[in-house]
Amino acid sequence: MAPADYLLPLAIFLIAALYSAIGQGGASGYLALMAIGDMPTTQMRPTALALNILVSATAAWRFSRAGHFSRQIFWPAIFGGMPMAMIGASIDLPDPAYKSMVALVLLYAAARLLQSTRNVRQAADFIIIPPPLPVALAGGVIGLVSGLTGNGGGIFLSPLMLLAHWSNAKMAAGTAAVFTLVNSIAGLAIVSSRIDKIPDYLGTWLLAAGMGAWLGSELGLKGLSENAARQCLAFALALAALRSIIAILS
């Protein structure tokens, strides 16, 4: 076996562990890895979505069981998000301007989250503001972007929940994980008809992602403070922005 055959599963394990700790599926990281490995574009989005489903399902189950899930935010967000995710997944949009916009949004959210860690309270003392009615509209925008880019949308929902003070970090992680799971399933249902070949090592990658998701969700539930969770999310956002920038330049 070539060195890449060992390094890719290890990288997927690490990405799954990092992202699941903050309720994300890690699609941005998987897409970046596959782009570096010159995987055909027809395989990249469905493969990333398959890994995303497994990782977000693990995080969703574990965070939800621990009580970190907001129905008040999830249902209106997914009502707007899922149909728009399916529409986005049916569109191929190789537009540098669009990718630049996504990168800027992610970088802005990362900077705001890092700024918010200066005076943030711990989860027990966090003041939560009830979300406004336009959550469904925000979910629709997030769903469309997630469908276009091949991720579940949690990478956009989590910072919105935190910066708007709709929840603390663990609640945002659990809600975003379920949102990511549902949108990823909807997206895969659309793009699966365009899969020409399943990657040879998909089973190994899924195993690595599943192990990483279990470890990461354990860390997210028991090992991360409010500040640390926000910092990890900001790091994940910056990585996703970097992936968009690389896509523009390549």
Image (cartoon, rainbow, N blue to C red):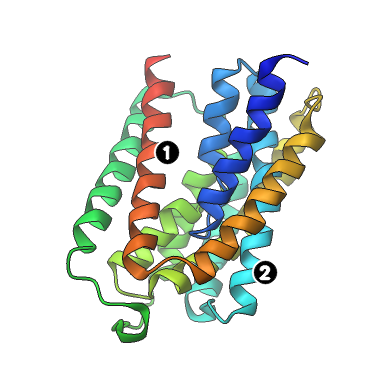
Does residue 55 sit above or below 64 in this rendering? above
Give the percent coordinates (x, y) of residue 224: 43, 65
**Residue 243 in the image, given as x and y percentages of width and height:** 43, 30
Question: Which circle marks residue 213 in the picture?
Answer: none
Horizontal relation, residue 181 to residue 195: left or right: left
130 vs 200, left or right, is: left
The residue to which callout 2 is attached is 61
Give SS at disc 2: helix
Does residue 120 lie above or below 230 as drawn?
A: below
Q: Quadrant of the C terminus?
A: top left
13 vs 76, left or right, is right
Q: Quadrant of the N terminus?
A: top right
Q: Residue at x 55, y 42 (%)?
A: 15
Residue 202: x %, y % from top left? 78, 33
Q: Mark 2 or mark 1, which has the lower sequence index?
A: 2
Mark 1, Cα crowd under 10 Å, few <14 / some 14-19 / many 20+, is: many
Task: Provide the secondary structure element on which disc 1 rests.
Answer: helix
Q: Is residue 88 visible?
A: no
- Tell me the residue at 26%/77% (across/down): 121
Residue at the spot x=24%, y=54% of the render?
Answer: 114
Whole-percent x and y of residue 138? 40, 61
Identity, as a three-letter code, of the amino acid under mark 1: Ala
- Between 5 and 93, the one lying in front of the other is 5
Residue name at image x 39 percent, y 53 percent = 232
**Label 2 packing within 10 angstroms: few (<14), some (14-19), many (20+):** some
The three-letter amino acid code for the residue at tag 2 is Trp
Q: Is residue 188 above or below residue 9?
A: below
Quadrant of res 45: top right
Identify the residue under disc 1. Answer: 240
